[in-house]
Image: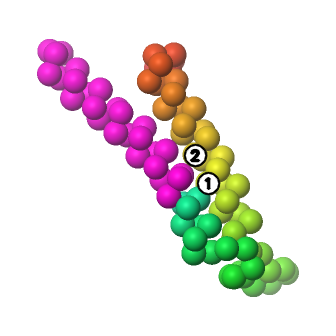
Amino acid sequence: MDALGRKIVYADDFLWHLSNVGVGVAVLVATLLYAPPGSYSLDLVVFSIDPFYLLVPLSAVYTAWTGIDFWKWYSGTDNQ
């Protein structure tokens, strides 16, 4: 692969990792803005649950996970 091809692959990898981190942050911010605690409720057969308490931890964990993966890739310690 020539130098231009390596730059294109690097840019593609960079944008892939950055967009994954951005999705986690976007879900976290959207949850905080549009579904604060107590504003919505999912009534299931047995119990009701507030989606805020599901989305905030999941998006925080996803953001941390993809952020760590991005950092490992960027610093060159990724084992791929």
Q: Amino acid under label 2?
A: Thr
Front one among 7 and 32: 32
Magenta residue span: 1-26
Specify whether residue 8 is painted magenta. Answer: yes
Q: Is residue 71 left or right of residue 62?
A: left
Label 1 neighbourhood size at 10 Å, few (<14), some (14-19), many (20+)?
A: many
Question: Is the C-beta separation of discs 2 and 1 under 8 Å?
Answer: yes
**In the image, what residue occupies the spot 51% across and 16% down?**
77
Q: Is residue 50 left or right of residue 69?
A: right
Q: Is 47 placed above or below 72 here?
A: below
| Colour scheme shown | rainbow
Query: How far across and how far down the image is residue 64, in percent?
Result: 61, 41
Q: Main secondary structure of the magenta part?
A: helix
**In the image, what residue occupies the spot 37% across and 40% down?**
16
Q: Is residue 57 left or right of residue 30?
A: right
Q: How many marks?
A: 2
The residue positioned farthest toward the right in the image shown: 46
The residues tagged by marks 2 and 1 sit, at their Cα atoms, a distance apart of: 6 Å
Residue 36's image quarter?
A: bottom right
Query: How far across and how far down the image is residue 1, in percent?
Result: 18, 15
Q: Which numbered marker is on residue 33? A: none
Per the image, label 1 sits on a secondary structure element best described as helix
Q: Amino acid under label 1?
A: Ser
Residue 35's image quarter?
A: bottom right
The residue positioned farthest toward the front in the image shown: 33
Q: Is 58 placed above or below 54 here?
A: above
Query: How far across and how far down the image is residue 57, in percent?
Result: 70, 55
**In the image, what residue occupies the spot 61% across and 54% down?**
59
Dot 2 corresponds to which residue? 63
Per the image, label 2 sits on a secondary structure element best described as helix
Dot 1 corresponds to which residue? 59
